[in-house]
Amino acid sequence: MISAIESLRWRCPTPADAVLWACILEATAPKAGNVYPGKSFHDLSYNDFVSAAHLTAEQFRSPDARFSCDVLSAVRSVSNQIGTNVNLGILLLIAPLVKIDQQSKLTKDVNSTSLAISELLEQLDSEDASHLYSAINQAHPGGMGNVDDMDLADSPPPDFMSAMRSARARDQIAENYSDGFQDLLQVVAPTIETCIGDSGDVLTGISRAHLVLLRRRPDSLIARKFGDQVALQVMTKADFDHNDAKACEQFDNFLRTSHPKPLNPGTTADLIAAGLYFLLRCQ
């Protein structure tokens, strides 16, 4: 029997197609505390995420030799047309995957894929650092130290990876850069695949995977915005029966209403999008 995720793979013959599907699936799944159809934030709507998905996919139809250029170009396109930071974290995670995919190095062998990602990232130079820092500032003017998705200094260093390693303890994206995307490949993607398989439905499986991942560790975006104790509280509250629809609704409401601003587990959502890309492109 063809699995739910396998039924979508034939729709993703190119990396750009998989970027589009991964971003739209992630945005459409009713993940607790996130934007999805019928649930918006004051400055972000579901349509914003769909538009950003299309803009991002178009950038990867004619990719640059440097994935850092793709990230910067996509961020500029999204910012110019939508006017806000929609998918910076997704871009930072997906762009390296697309690059090694184009090199035919994205495989089900997670150790081999992790090694290929590490080798790619270690080749980043000062020009790449400048592109990536410009993307971060474009997504959120005012300095990288204040950007939700990253926690870096204001000036790009010659070695971008040294900055990522310094931030790895407090930022899940930086952690994945530091470890060759091991968490994404060994935990996030398998969790998504298992939850989709168990539920028999892609959107339901994505939503449950999101809860499983939130139960496993604190979301670094929540930690940055609200502090470690709040992030730990969210992790604790995510420990419930994820098949219980009422409990899921209550957790979603808690994330949206318990604080003056929503507790948006956005980094976990970014990882979900990147994990979906991996699953859609690996046969």
Image (cartoon, helix red, strand yellow):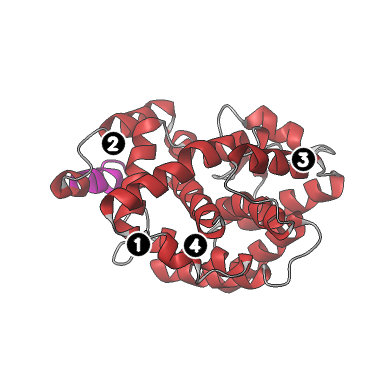
- The tag on residue 36 is 1
Can residue 254 be found in the magenta stretch?
yes
Identify the mark nearer the N-term, 2 or 4: 4
Can residue 179 be found in the magenta stretch?
no
Give the residue type at disc 3: Glu
Magenta residues: mostly which secondary structure?
helix
Identify the mark nearer the N-term, 3 or 1: 1
Nearer to us: label 3 or label 4: 3
> In whole angstroms, how far apart are the C-alphas of marks 2 and 4?
23 Å
Assess disc 4: are there few (<14), some (14-19) or many (≥20) residues with their C-alpha within 10 Å of its C-alpha.
many
Identify the mark nearer the N-term, 3 or 4: 4
Query: According to the image, label 2 marks what residue?
Result: 238
Quadrant of residue 157 within the rendered picture: top right
Quadrant of residue 81 within the rendered picture: bottom right
Q: Residue at x 34, y 39 (%)?
A: 212
Assess disc 2: are there few (<14), some (14-19) or many (≥20) residues with their C-alpha within 10 Å of its C-alpha.
many
> Where's residue 253, x and y in %?
23, 48
Give the residue type at disc 1: Tyr
Image: magenta residue range: 250-259
| Side (left or right) of 180 relative to 227 | right
Assess disc 1: are there few (<14), some (14-19) or many (≥20) residues with their C-alpha within 10 Å of its C-alpha.
many
Query: According to the image, label 3 marks what residue?
Result: 119
Nearer to me, 91 or 221: 91
Q: Secondary structure at mark 3?
A: helix
Assess disc 3: are there few (<14), some (14-19) or many (≥20) residues with their C-alpha within 10 Å of its C-alpha.
few
> In whole angstroms, how far apart are the C-alphas of marks 4 and 1?
12 Å
Q: Residue at x 48, y 55 (%)?
A: 276
Q: Secondary structure at mark 4?
A: helix
| Side (left or right) of 129 relative to 252 | right
> Where's residue 154, x and y in %?
72, 40
Query: According to the image, label 4 marks what residue?
Result: 23
Give the residue type at disc 4: Cys
